[in-house]
Amino acid sequence: MYKNTLPKDYTDTAITLSRLYGIAETLYPWEYLDNDRFTDIIKVWTEEFLCADNPQKDILKFFEMKIDKYQKEQDIL
C-alpha cells in the first residue's frame, strides 16, 4: 500500500470521494457512468490523493481539481 497509509485510510478516502462524486453528479448533467468505470476513477483518485506529498491534504480541494478536469473531459466528448 502507500507509505504510512492504513487500509482504513484507503477505504475512508474512497468512500469520501465517492460521496462527493454523487453530490456533484446531481449538480451537473453528465453522461451515464457505469459501475466499472466509476470504480476505476475512484481508485485512481484515491491513490493519487493518498500519494500526494502535501501533509495538509485537503480532500475537497483535491476533488474540486479532479472534478473540474473530469467535467472538461465530458464537455469535449
Image (spheres, rainbow, N blue to C red):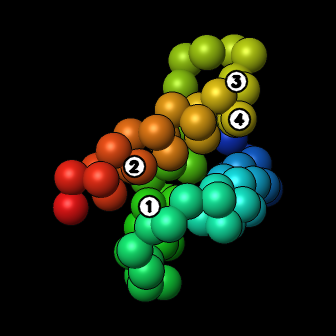
Q: Looking at the image, which is closer to me, 56 or 60? A: 60
Residue 56 in sight in this render: yes
Disc 1 residue crowd, few under 14, some 14–19, many 20+, Cα 10 Å: some
SS state under label 3: loop
* Residue type indicated by callout 3: Lys
| Residue drawn at point x = 70 percent, y = 55 percent | 20
Residue that numbered label 3 is attached to: 57
Residue that numbered label 1 is attached to: 41
Q: CA distance from mark 3 to mark 2?
A: 20 Å
Sequence-earlier tag: 2 or 1: 1
- Left or right of 43 on screen, residue 9: right
* Residue type indicated by callout 1: Ile
Marks 2 and 1 in Cβ contact (< 8 Å): yes
Sequence-earlier tag: 4 or 1: 1
Residue that numbered label 2 is attached to: 70
* Residue type indicated by callout 4: Leu
Q: Is residue 9 above or below residue 26?
A: above
* Residue type indicated by callout 2: Tyr
| Residue drawn at point x = 70 percent, y = 35 percent | 59
Depth-wise, is mark 2 or mark 4 nearer the camera? 2
Disc 4 residue crowd, few under 14, some 14–19, many 20+, Cα 10 Å: few
Q: CA distance from mark 2 to mark 4?
A: 15 Å
